[in-house]
Each structure stands twice: as C-alpha cells, then as structure tokens.
Image (tube, rainbow, N blue to C red):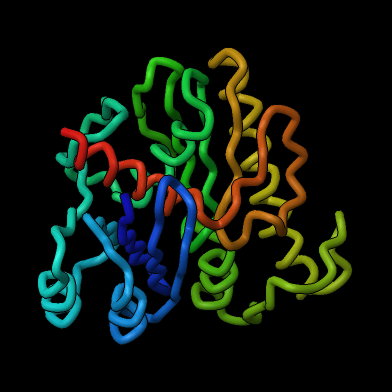
Amino acid sequence: MVHLVVDIGNSSTKSAVMSDGRVLSVCREECLGNGLSELVSDAKISCGICSSVRELTDGERILLSSLPFPVIHLSAQTPLPLRIVYSTPGTLGPDRIASAVGAWKRMPGRNLLIIDAGTAVTYDVVTAEGEYLGGNISPGLSMRLRALHEFTGRLPLVNPDGDVPDVGYSTETAIRSGVVLGMRDEMLGCISRLSAGYDSIFVFLTGGDAELFGIPIKNGIFADEFLLLEGLDTICSFNEKM
C-alpha cells in the first residue's frame, strides 16, 4: 500500500509518499502547495493522512479535499495501534501521537520514552502494554534564547551555534551554555527519572535540535527525521485494514 503522509509543524511542512514504512519521495514547504501536488501526481496512492499542530488554511483544506483518495486528519479520536490513556485526549497534539506510534512500531513490547527537540521539547511515554500515558512539554532551544532576549532589557539574542563552555566567559557564551546545557541536563534528568520508574525503558531522541545536546543514551537511539512520518504511515495502514 502506498500512502501520502503530511506533517504540518510550527515552522514548516513535510510531505512524503511512503510504502511499507519506506519513504519513496519527500518534499518540504512552508505550507502545503505546489510541492504536495507534484509529489502525488504520479503516485498510485490508496490513502493519505495529515498531522497538523495548527489550524489548516482554507487553501490547505481545499488542496487536501481535492486529492483523489481519502485523507485522514489525525486526532486522538482516530483509531490507533496504541491505547491513549491521556486524561485530556482532545488537547493532545497529533505530532506527539504519530511519533509515539512510530517509536512503538520500531520497538513494540518495550517501555518507551520519545524526546522530540523541536520548536518545543516534548517527552512522551508509551508502556510495554501499548498504552500512551502522556508526557511533558518545555520550551525549545530557539524559544528559550528568544525569551531571554525579549523579556529582558539588555540580554542579546544569541545564535545557538558556537562555543558551549561549562562556565560562560562572556554574556554570549553564558546565555548559550545556560540554555544548551540546561536543556541537556533537563533531558538527562528526565531519562534518569523515568528509567527508575519503568523497566528497561528505551529512549528515542529526535527533532531538529536533538544532536546539539550530546546526550549519551545507554539504552536508546537517535531516531532519524522520519520517525513521525513512519508513525503516520503505520496509522494509515492500521485504518485501511479496519
């Protein structure tokens, strides 16, 4: 089965044609448009699925509804291979759902922690029994750097790329080290705390900023950029078989 999967994030949109978990072709745009139309033009797609962390524009809705195959708009009400036990499923981001499913497909039957370091940092837990429990959300790297600049009178906006000493030797390095090392300690603390509570928890670390933090993961992996897309493809297959 060939599927169209669409991930609409806070800063960009990623669309891919996938078959049996493999990415056949992919495009990135600021919002859905010509790239998506070209992506699907020659593909024999049976089903599509869209995950969006924001409201779709009228143009995006029209584009998706015009496709010659059904498109699932992912939410907590969508049938899933995991059971959601989150107390407010209506507020749960579809991107978190998709990443959890992608991780579960790779490592079924294990306790899982999925850390996604993007615009925000999300921490999500899936039990070995296939229950999505929930997790935590904190500001991402750029958000923290921007907040220090915008909510103070004199602190500069610092580029995340550069020296990250243990002890900052200038205002710039003090800010960068405070944010980068603070996030690293936050992630390590979360891994340590949850490892004590969940046997043999397996960690997935993904997202655009993940590799900046040098997290040593004893029982886990750096997931590639397609973890969320794999989850969408898995959900699409799950619904087609129902």
Q: Residue at x 69, y 47 (%)?
A: 184
Q: Nearer the viewer, residue 113 or 47?
A: 47
Q: Image check: 31 left or right of 198?
A: left
Residue 207 placed where, x, y %? 55, 56
Q: Answer above or below: position of 202 versus 159.
A: above
> Which one is nearer the viewer's eye here, 100 or 166?
100
Q: Position of residue 79 (x, y in %)?
A: 19, 36
Which part of the image, by quadrant, shows the C terminus?
top left
Q: Answer left or right for 187 relative to 77.
A: right
Number of marks in picture: 0
Q: Residue at x 25, y 56 (%)?
A: 49
Q: Position of residue 136 (x, y in %)?
A: 43, 40
Residue 69's image quarter? Answer: bottom left
Q: Position of residue 161 (x, y in %)?
A: 74, 73
- Residue at 68 percent across and 51 percent down: it is 182
**Rendered position, 114 above or below 74:** above
Residue 221, relative to residue 147: is it above or below? above
Q: Nearer the viewer, residue 9 or 66?
A: 66
Q: Is residue 32 above or below residue 95?
A: below
Nearer to us in this view, 96 or 42: 42
